[in-house]
Structures are given as structure tokens and as C-alpha cells.
Image: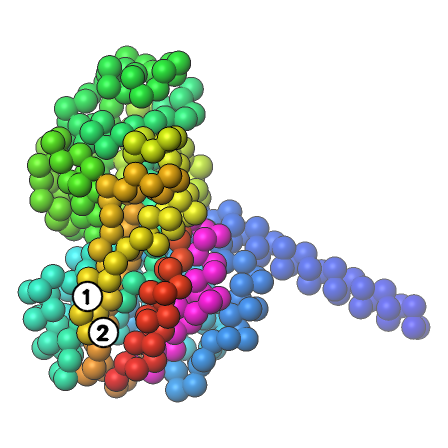
């Protein structure tokens, strides 16, 4: 009887391990670009999340750039705080800000800081304060491409600008050939793909080109795509899907989308000793040099898109969670503080680098935590 009981226990343990492994493989193999959460991360999060006072539903919306990070955070957080349901609608930064200023969400995600007119608009919702920017997610904007036989494509800012401005139209253009000696570049058309809706990723992409390729990119850095030609797609997931499917295509999106779909990414010739790859580590080197340009509790950052520092990937973005510094909806305030507190915690930030994002530098993140704790 003792032997039978021991065998049953052993079989039960093996079964549980198999189920756990299956769940992990399902998460990692998911084609919704969630990137997987990892059972270990959920367990770790459960020990550190402060759930006190949080209950019911929390609605949020905005940036699709942080969707994969948000998926990870939501799963881990809800595993720790079983009485709370987080619903983040991934759309665009513009839609997220609109939802926030209309008072329909507890917080919004945006890849660009609030403009002065948006701050003014937020005061209607933040009865005793205004909307502020809390940097929560960093990472590289990757340039993904579909060019069979070319595994290490190198471009510089002027070439990228001309491709997306419909001035370089063939893959064997002399400018691309010069940057890729020895590569077998085909005499075929380039199909560039951009975001069709208002997008903070587009705006950050434009900021990079405006700084690093000023002579070739004359457009203002706005959320709406400004250049002629190319094909539009919905969200970063739509751009990545087009690049994955269409041979000869090229598009911009967050690294996590390239990683999850095995899309090769461009190395950028910044003028440093060697071209720089789009990695979390290389993006962190650029983000670490960011300066806070916001005032008061606003932590909007100024990034150096034209950096030539060794190993620093210059095409980066920071996604902000937008909240009221005071005057938050009392029905959602506890949930907002609890959830964002987890996202800014060591555990919340640690999982970012494992999934194609870059954690916010410690010096800045400590201020984020302090402000979250003081929201009212």
C-alpha cells in the first residue's frame, strides 16, 4: 500500500510538471505575439505585488507597442491579485489618449508624451490635477525585412529615410549595396510598410529620422504617417504580419514582434565602429542617456536619437502610462496604483528584457515608483 501511494504521488507530480511545461510551451508558441509569461515570473510576482484595496475591473487602452509587455504584466498581476480584472485594449497611442481624456479608462499607454493641448484636455477628467507621463516600457524600434538570402542587412539613417520616403525603390540600389558589400541584393522592388493609424511608434520613428537623417527626412514627427507611397497596416502586429508575408517588404515595429515571428532585423550604421543590432541591451544603452524634460510629477523624457555611442541602438521609444497626478477616478485609483506599482517593480521590469523590451533605467524608475505611490 505504501509503495502504491508513493507511485501515485510520483505520477501526480510528473503529471503536474507536464501540464506546467505544456502551459509554458503554449505561451511561448502563441501567435498572438504575447511572447509568453513564464510560470516562474508569475510565482515571483505573487510574492511582491501589493493587492490591498484593489478589486473589480480596471480598463486601460492605448499603445500597441507595449502590448506584449502589458500581456505579461496582466497575466502575472492577475495571478497574484485574483480579485482584480485588468482589461488593456491595444489600439494606438492616439486612441489611448482620447480614451483617457474622455474619462473611459483608468490609464492610457502612449509612445509619445502628452502634448500641451492634451494636458489641458486632461484637466477636465483630472478634476484637481492633470495628466502626467510615467515612463514604464523601453525598447528598440526594429526595422524588420523579408529578403531571402540576406541575413545581415545593414542600413544607415539616410538610406532608411529614402526607403520610407519612396526615393530608394530597389533592393540593389547603390546606397544599399555600398552598406552591404558581398551581400546578394536582388534587383527587385522594395515594399515599405508603415502604421496606418495614429501611432506613437510612427512618431518616434520620425523623430529618429528627423535627427539622424535631417537632409533626407523633412517631415514633422507626428503620429500620422507623413510620407508618400508605401503600404499601411493596422498596429505594429499588422505591420509585422505584412513584412512576414510579403517578400521584398520592410517595416518598423517593436523588437518583440520581430522576435516572436522570427523576422530578421536591420543593423544600423550609426557612425560607431560597428553597425548596431536591435537588441534590448543596445537599446538600454541609448535610453540610459535620456534626460527628464517634464516638470513636477511629469517624467517625459528627452532621447538622443542621433547618438554614435558604441553599441547604442539609436532608434528607441519609451512608452508612457498616462494617469492623473491627482483627481483620479476613486473607483479605479486603487487598481491603478496597485497594477502600475507592480509594472514598475523590480519583478515587473525584470521580465521586459526577456521579451524584447528594455527596462527603464533605475534612476528614472525610482521616481516613477514614488509618483505612483503618491497618486490621489
**Left or right relative to 232: residue 285:** right
Q: Does the image show residue 93?
A: no
The CA span between labels 1 and 2 is: 8 Å
- Please report the residue visible at 9 percent of the width from the left and 77 percent of the height from the top: 124
- Callout 2: few (<14), some (14-19), or many (20+) C-alpha neighbours within 10 Å? many
**Left or right relative to 172: residue 119:** left
Residue 293 appears in which quarter of the rendering? Answer: bottom left
Return the residue nearer the eye: 237 or 151. Answer: 151
Return the residue nearer the eye: 342 or 315. Answer: 315
Q: Where is residue 57 shown, x and y percent of the image?
A: 34, 77
- Residue 294: mark: 1
Q: Secondary structure at mark 2?
A: loop
Q: Is residue 227 above or below residue 359?
A: above
Say whether marks 1 and 2 touch (CB < 8 Å). Answer: yes
Can residue 344 be found in the magenta stretch?
yes
Q: Is residue 60 above or below residue 279?
A: below
- Please report the residue visible at 14 percent of the width from the left and 70 percent of the height from the top: 101
Bounds of the magenta span? 333-356
Q: Where is residue 375 shown, x and y percent of the image?
A: 28, 81
Return the residue nearer the eye: 207 or 248. Answer: 207
Give the labeled residue for mark 2.
297
Q: Where is residue 76 shown, x and y percent of the image?
A: 48, 67
Q: Quadrant of the N terminus?
A: bottom right
What is the chief secondary structure element of the magenta stretch? helix
- Please report the residue visible at 9 percent of the width from the left and 44 percent of the height from the top: 220
- Callout 1: few (<14), some (14-19), or many (20+) C-alpha neighbours within 10 Å? some
Q: Quadrant of the C terminus?
A: bottom left
**Left or right relative to 343: residue 319:** left
Amino acid at each position: 500500500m505504501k509503495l502504491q501511494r508513493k507511485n501515485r504521488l510520483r505520477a501526480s507530480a510528473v503529471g503536474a510538471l507536464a501540464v506546467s511545461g505544456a502551459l509554458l510551451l503554449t505561451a511561448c508558441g502563441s501567435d498572438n505575439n504575447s511572447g509568453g509569461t513564464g510560470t516562474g515570473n508569475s510565482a515571483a510576482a505573487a510574492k511582491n505585488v501589493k493587492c490591498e484595496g484593489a478589486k473589480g475591473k480596471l480598463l486601460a487602452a492605448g499603445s500597441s507597442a507595449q502590448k506584449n509587455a502589458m500581456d505579461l504584466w496582466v497575466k502575472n498581476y492577475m495571478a497574484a491579485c485574483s480579485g482584480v480584472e485588468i482589461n488593456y485594449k491595444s489600439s494606438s497611442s492616439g486612441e489611448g489618449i482620447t480614451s483617457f481624456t474622455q474619462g473611459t479608462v483608468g490609464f492610457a499607454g502612449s509612445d509619445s508624451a502628452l502634448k500641451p493641448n492634451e494636458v489641458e484636455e486632461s484637466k477636465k477628467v483630472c478634476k484637481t490635477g492633470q495628466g502626467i507621463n510615467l515612463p514604464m516600457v523601453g525598447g528598440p524600434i526594429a526595422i524588420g525585412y523579408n529578403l531571402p538570402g540576406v541575413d545581415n542587412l545593414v542600413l544607415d539613417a539616410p538610406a532608411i529615410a529614402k526607403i520610407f520616403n519612396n526615393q530608394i525603390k530597389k533592393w540593389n540600389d547603390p546606397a544599399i549595396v555600398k552598406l552591404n558589400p558581398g551581400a546578394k541584393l536582388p534587383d527587385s522592388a522594395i515594399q515599405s510598410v508603415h502604421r496606418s493609424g495614429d501611432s506613437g511608434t510612427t512618431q518616434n520613428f520620425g523623430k529618429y529620422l528627423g535627427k539622424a537623417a535631417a537632409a533626407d527626412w523633412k517631415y514633422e514627427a507626428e503620429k500620422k504617417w507623413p510620407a508618400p507611397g508605401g503600404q499601411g497596416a493596422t498596429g505594429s502586429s499588422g505591420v509585422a504580419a505584412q513584412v512576414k508575408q510579403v517578400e521584398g517588404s520592410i517595416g518598423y515595429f517593436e523588437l518583440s514582434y520581430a522576435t516572436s515571428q522570427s523576422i530578421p532585423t536591420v543593423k544600423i550604421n550609426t557612425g560607431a565602429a560597428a553597425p548596431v543590432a536591435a537588441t534590448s541591451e543596445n537599446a538600454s544603452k541609448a535610453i540610459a542617456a535620456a534626460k527628464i524634460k517634464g516638470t513636477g510629477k511629469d517624467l517625459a523624457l528627452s532621447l538622443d536619437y542621433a547618438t554614435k555611442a558604441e553599441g547604442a541602438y539609436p532608434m528607441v521609444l519609451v512608452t508612457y502610462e498616462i494617469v492623473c497626478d491627482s483627481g483620479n477616478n476613486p473607483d479605479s485609483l486603487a487598481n491603478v496604483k496597485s497594477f502600475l506599482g507592480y509594472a514598475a517593480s523590480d519583478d515587473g521590469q525584470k521580465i521586459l528584457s526577456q521579451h524584447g523590451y528594455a527596462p527603464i533605467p533605475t534612476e528614472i524608475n525610482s521616481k516613477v515608483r514614488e509618483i505612483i505611490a503618491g497618486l490621489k
